[in-house]
Image (tube, rainbow, N blue to C red):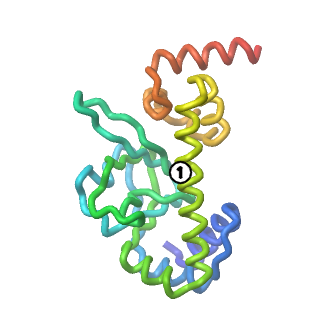
Amino acid sequence: MDKKQIVSQLMSMAKQHKIEISPDTLGKIVNMSVFHVAEKGKCLKHIGDETQNAGLVLSGIVRCFYIDENGNDITRGFAITGTLCMDEGMFGYSESLTEWETLEETTLMVFSVEQIKKLIYEDDLLKNAYITLLENALRYKIYRENGFLVENATERYVHFRKLYPEICTSVKQQYIATYLGIAPESLSRIRRNMKETEK
């Protein structure tokens, strides 16, 4: 992959997320990273795997999910272009809490958590970007908890559709349903009712 092109892509992603970061710093991150394309349905990390590496999705969609005591998988979240995946190590976990699976062909930039954290502490702009990342993660967590506490299933789906329009059209409905905490049949009914209302 062309490193200059990747730095340019990362600069565009940073701008989109309102993150200020220098091209030189992005160049350092690119140089310490490994790039690969994972086919659809590829398991990137299992529950219990070590978390010394994390990844950034350059294109594609990755899903992380739990396995309950009955063997059912429950979606915790999705990583889309410009977001982190396999990132538990960035938050201090030594083992992965979830399974990570690609839902379509996905291009990943994978880097060492230890190396990236060392760079974060040495670079003020990168440190500010990391703080923004943590704030966004916390804001998202609060938003999700709020949804489960005060919103009904339809409201949760409406908000999800606004946040992730591309996921709604390209991901299996059962994955979205478990993410929203409802049965796939209930999601189908919600979607059907919404279509009828929109007519």
The image shows residue 182 at horizontal and vertical percentages of 46, 24
When asked about the image quadrant of residue 49, the answer is bottom left
The image shows residue 153 at horizontal and vertical percentages of 56, 23
Q: Which residue is mark 1?
A: 80
Is residue 108 found left or right of 125 in the rendered image? left
- Quarter of the image containing the C terminus? top right
Q: How many numbered badges does the structure rendering display?
A: 1
The image shows residue 34 at horizontal and vertical percentages of 39, 72
| Residue 160 drawn above or below residue 25 | above
Label 1 crowd (10 A; few <14 / some 14-19 / many >=20):
many
**Picture residue at 35% right of the left edge, 43% below the top:** 41
The image shows residue 66 at horizontal and vertical percentages of 33, 40
| Residue 126 drawn above or below residue 79 | below
When asked about the image quadrant of residue 85, the answer is bottom left
| Residue 138 drawn above or below residue 89 | above
Viewer-side residue, 136 vs 61: 136
* Residue most extreme to the front: 149
**Picture residue at 59% right of the left edge, 73% below the top:** 5
**Picture residue at 55% right of the left edge, 70% below the top:** 130
Q: Mark 1 belongs to which amino acid?
A: Ile
**Picture residue at 54% right of the left edge, 55% below the top:** 138
When asked about the image quadrant of residue 135, the answer is bottom right
Is residue 70 found left or right of 23 in the rendered image? left
Viewer-side residue, 188 vs 150: 150
Q: Under tag 1, what secondary structure?
A: strand
| Residue 52 drawn above or below residue 144 | below
